[in-house]
Amino acid sequence: MTVSSHKIGGPQGAAALILDKRIDITPLLHGGGQEKGLRSGTENVAAIVGFGLACELAVANKNTFASHTSLLRDAFEQGLKVIAKDLNIVIFGDKAKRLPNTSFFAIEGIEGETLVMALDRKGSACSSDSTEPSHVLLAMSVDKDLARGAVRVSFGLNNTLEEVLGFLTALQNETARLKQLTAITA
Amino acid sequence: MSATIEMPVVKDLYDANGLAKEVVPVYLDYSATTPVDPRVAAKMIPYITEHFGNPASRSHPYGWTAEKAVEIAREEVAKLVGADPREIVWTSGATESNNLAIKGAANFYSGKGKHIITIATEHKAVIDAVRELERVGFEATYLEPEPNGLVDLTKFKAAIRPDTVLASVMFVNNEIGVIQDITAIGNICRENNVIFHVDAAQATGKVKIDLEKLPVDLMSFCAHKTYGPKGIGALYVRRKPRIRIEAQMHGGGHERGMRSGTLATHQIVGMGEAFRIAREEMDVENARILKLRDKLLHGLETMEEVYVNGDLEHRVPHNLNISFNYVEGESLIMAVKGIAVSSGSACTSASLEPSYVLRALGRSDELAHSSIRFSIGRFTTEEDIDYTIKLMKSKIDKLRELSPLWEMFKDGIDLSKVQWASH
């Protein structure tokens, strides 16, 4: 199992592979024989210490993280349905078991990249695939045009309900504006 | 200038009598790793906390800030070595750079041939990468250097075969500090259409590197030997004439597809700052370190039966590798706990095998075992050197007093002619 530091509040540049003792693997980096010969190279001590503490905190905060971010996420998604009630909104994976902190959605007729850039000017950072539609969504048989509209919002412990409301307001204004633009240019 | 910067963590090295406290040995192992320069650490911290973005995030300023910092650092690294920033590929360190260069180039150009030349005294990251290629069908020549540690150019030329695809020679040796004639070796490679890789992990900030002029195709770097953080390195990949390598890490297509993986922004920022400082302060620093090295050398040379390993002329001033004859290796390590150094028994691993580098120079097992690598750096002071000379003299004297071999030597017996009884 692969685990990474910088997705759980640790520094970038450290990760680990959890390996069953009975499994043999061929190393990819040779020379020095660190990590029982499985991964040579001087250990990035500072990043590893940071990763260790991040893991400790993740365990301690597991329940808080889940309850806090799922509260924000659910509030966001409910708000999303309200502000865009005239539009066709798809939330990907909402019927499946998913992470409490992530919402991946698309608004039909609005390009994800355009929306993200517009939101960015209003002070919100989220992500979309710039040119190509997400290969994950395509693999889930999502329509190509809809997939192009996909935006990922992911919350952390530091986000607040006020930020979610501010984001929804910006989203409401921008979708309305973009919808208008699309109507004019179409 | 560098004298005004204090070593960051280790303080209170000496007691009221000017003696080093036993708990904190004097650090003379800069070739193993250097402390992060406080200026480098200060520059890194904001990129862990406030500017934490992923440089691959193209759609918001968190990502842009990180990406900009990464590109500035890339320019700094390129500037120190006379390269174009587009020729610099980030890696996790010199081990990865060496693996990527050697396996990447050998695999990409294997159609041309499957023979590789390297030197017996290379770092394990080069030797083991070449050995791995041997396992999958390549052939390799491990050229023995001359007794002074340098490569003989005629022998190097003679080792080239029609199917030789790649040669890998380190710039500065990690154990003995000798500087190879990279220009001459590179020219031979060019004449014979052989791709030339150089491991420069120990060279940055110590010797001038100008890749615009050097006939080198691939060059490995790392930060933590030049006062940057561990866990970050780079590989230079020449653009003109263009050198191709096969990626060893896939997924994401970062670094022009040559090395996938999220870039560790703060680490990269640290490497950039470390290399900027190296470029600006190298000349002054090397002159200061050479003085300390000479002081240490002259201090130790007052003892009998002391041998410098490796050429003294073609050598970085930071390194002094010395064999103390008639002293038993393991007791020597135990005796010098007051200084943090590497020994010929422990340079490569925790095992008590004598150093393969010193053995390749033709040193006996005994002399290889009883060797010590002193490596001097930015935060070494004159007091550190004075203390080291004093400590070495008293400990070597004591160990030799206990040695029957030393007694025989002093009695004028030629030990090489003694017939030892087998048992």
Image: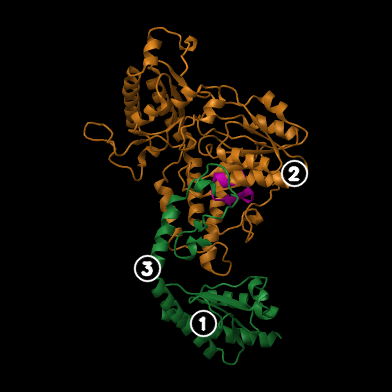
Q: Are marks 2 and 3 on the same chain?
A: no
Nearer the camera: disc 1 or disc 3: 3
Regarding residue A67, the answer to whether it shows in the image is yes
Regarding residue B243, the answer to whether it shows in the image is no
Q: Distance of mark 2 from mark 3, alpha carbons? A: 52 Å
Label 2: chain? B
Instruction: Indicate the secondary structure of the residue bearing disc 3.
Output: helix
Label 1: chain? A
Q: Which residues are magenta?
A: B82-96
Q: Which numbered tag is attached to residue A60?
A: 3
- Residue A137 picture location, percent across and down: 64, 75
Q: Are marks 1 and 3 on the same chain?
A: yes
Q: Which chain is orange?
A: B
Residue at mark 2: B110
The answer to whether residue B230 is magenta is no
Measured along the vertical axis of the image, is residue B145 above or below residue A105? above
Measured along the vertical axis of the image, is residue A86 above or below residue A125? below
For chain A, give the colour.
green
The quadrant in which the C terminus of chain A is found is: bottom right
Instruction: Indicate the secondary structure of the residue bearing disc 1.
Output: helix
Side of A161 relative to B205 (left or right):
left
Give the residue type at disc 1.
Ala
Q: Which numbered tag is attached to residue A170?
A: 1
Q: Residues within 10 Å of mark 2 (few under 14, many from 20)?
A: some
- Residue depicted at x 56% and y 35%: B208
Measured along the vertical axis of the image, is residue A18 above or below residue B171? below
- Judging from the image, the colouring scheme is by chain
Side of B271 relative to B35 (left or right):
right
Give the residue type at disc 2.
Ser
